[in-house]
Structures are given as structure tokens and as C-alpha cells.
Amino acid sequence: MRKIITYSLFMYLLLFTFACKTIPSEPAPNDLIDRDSMVYFLADRAIAEGIIHYTPAQQDQRQVAANVYLQLYEKYHLTQERVDASLQYYLSDKEMATTLMNDVDKRITEIKKATLGE
């Protein structure tokens, strides 16, 4: 579990580091996912990506990924397009992206503590 969380955090840190732009924020999309929901979604998505990454070789990773993502998007009643538009907005400002990522990290830590009983 620790490897999954560590790997997922590393991937998101890379994503946010290289996705941040120095131009002013773009306008928020009409169907912007609220910040708290985005934090919860991104934390769950990071964990889901860890699960997919550590799927045993004998299982079809593509099928596992499709099922995991389908369940994740259904849980939050979201579409890929809405997530992409909202994520683009949140990443358009470096401070907003950093704060978002820090909150995602805190959420993953909360999940870890609840799961491991720490």
C-alpha cells in the first residue's frame, strides 16, 4: 500500500510540476468541479493508478484500468471531459495548483491512516 501511495504521489507531483503555466489563470469552465470534490477525486484517482500499476502481470491491466476508472467516474458522477477542463483550470495558476496538490497529499495521508489504523 505504501508503494502504491508513494508512486501515485510521485506521478502527480511530476504532473503538477510540469503542467503549471506562468500565464494568468484561464477562466473557470461553466461546469467546474468544486475544489473539495476535485481534491477527493484526485486522491482517489492517485490510489486507483497505484492499484492499476501494481496489478499482477497475469491479469489484463487494460481491463483492470477500464473497470477501476469506470467505477471512479461513476462514484463522483463525472466525465473525463469535465475532469480535464476543471484540472486545466486548477493547473493554470501555479499557486492554485500547488495548494490543490498539497490538499490531495493530505487527503491521501488521511486515507492511509484510516486504512492502516495509524
Image (cartoon, grey):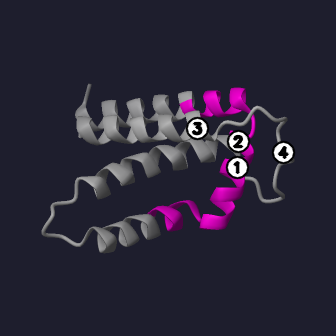
Give the label on residue 62, or none.
Answer: none
Query: The C terminus lies in which quarter of the figure?
Result: top left
Q: Is mark 4 on a helix, strand or loop?
A: loop
Q: Is residue 56 left or right of residue 5?
A: left
Of the image marks 1 and 3, the number of the one nearer the N terminus: 3
Q: Is residue 111 left or right of residue 80?
A: left
Query: The N terminus lies in which quarter of the figure?
Result: top left
Report the predominant secondary structure element of the magenta stretch. Answer: helix
Q: What element carries label 2?
A: helix
In the rendered structure, are the residues bearing label 1 and label 2 in contact, judged by CB atoms less than 8 Å apart?
yes
Residue type at mark 4: give it: Glu
Give the label on residue 18, or none.
Answer: 3
Task: Tell me residue 56's x, y (percent).
Answer: 16, 60
Image depth: mark 3 or mark 4 in front: 3
Residue type at mark 3: give it: Phe
Residue 20 appears in which quarter of the rendering? top right
Q: What stretch is highlighted in magenta?
A: 72-101
> Which residue has dot 1 on it?
88
Distance between the alpha carbons at the discs numbered 2 and 3: 13 Å
> Which residue has dot 4 on it?
26
Residue 103 appears in which quarter of the rendering? top right
Residue type at mark 2: give it: Tyr
